[in-house]
Image (cartoon, rainbow, N blue to C red):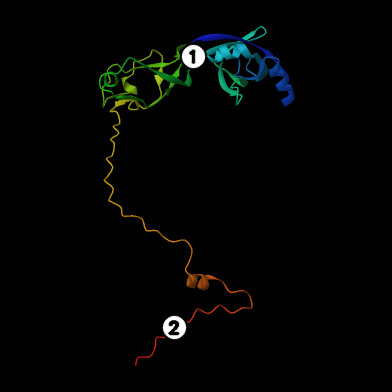
Amino acid sequence: MESLILEAESRETLSNGGLKGLRKQGWVPAILYGGYQGEVLSQNRLLKVPEKSLIKTLGKHNAVVELKIGTETAPVVIKEIQKHIITQKPIHVDFQIISMTEKLEVMVPVHFVGESPGVKLHGGILQHVVRELKVSALPKDIPQEIPVDVSQLDIGHGIAVSQLTVIPGVQILVDPHQLVANVVAPTILEETTAAAAPATTEPEVIAKGKKPEEEAEAAPAKPGEKPAASPAKTAAPPAK
């Protein structure tokens, strides 16, 4: 694990307005959480760190930070960081003191290396089943990433955690049978042949409006009026 140096200064408890003012001056409010008895800087401390220096530090995944506060120094890791919802700039950071002689459990991203013949020669698709793995290691042994060699993967084949190259001092805390990546056949989208539409006859023309007798039947009676009677049918002449 790479070690970086970050300088910080102590600060007092501030209101929301005071924290905003601090950020305008180029600082990021921070808290340092103590580790264990007997360790330097073991008590929680309110700090502020330069924004530009912190952003550079954030570019190094899982880096141990040598935090300097005046004449004191301590190895820490970033426990949590809050970012502005729009600008994504850091607005608050939590540091945690660590021991260089005790193992940590952290998430490490996987990095795919090589070119799969199933993809290159047969048009397959490389599926990234997992993006990171949980590991246990001493701070100095924690890698920036875990390499995953896919140069032997053909269509229908994959690589599991148990097949990854062993990294000295690093224990992967994941089921050995967990699939990390595999190559699948490309999805073939077949065009469905449209069925021949049956011959249609000329559409029936429906006259707009209603017949007189339909209008009379449909017209509602006004209050106090009797419904209009339907016109009487003309009686057929008597047979002679």
Earlier-in-chain disc, 1 versus 2: 1
- Vertical placement of residue 224 versus 86, above or below: below
- Give the quarter of the figure containing the C terminus: bottom left
- Vertical placement of residue 38 versus 237, above or below: above
Q: Amino acid at mark 2?
A: Thr
Residue 85, given in percent of the width and then of the height, sits at: 60, 26
From the image, tell me which residue sits under label 2.
234
In the figure, is residue 228 to the left or right of 107?
Answer: right
Residue 182, given in percent of the width and then of the height, sits at: 31, 25
Q: Residue at x 47, y 69 (%)?
A: 211
In the figure, is residue 224 to the left or right of 171?
Answer: right
Quadrant in the rendering for residue 193: top left
In the figure, is residue 59 to the left or right of 191?
Answer: right
In the figure, is residue 67 to the left or right of 190?
Answer: right
For the residue pair 159 and 169, the one nearer the viewer reads as: 159
Residue 46, given in percent of the width and then of the height, sits at: 68, 19
For the residue pair 119 and 218, the one nearer the viewer reads as: 218
Q: Is residue 15 visible?
A: no
Secondary structure found at label 2? loop
Secondary structure found at label 1? helix
For the residue pair 62 and 138, the one nearer the viewer reads as: 62
Q: Residue at x 32, y 22 (%)?
A: 162
For the residue pair 143 and 45, the one nearer the viewer reads as: 143
Separation of marks 1 and 2 at Cα, in angstroms: 108 Å
From the image, tell me which residue sits under label 1.
139
Q: How many marks?
A: 2
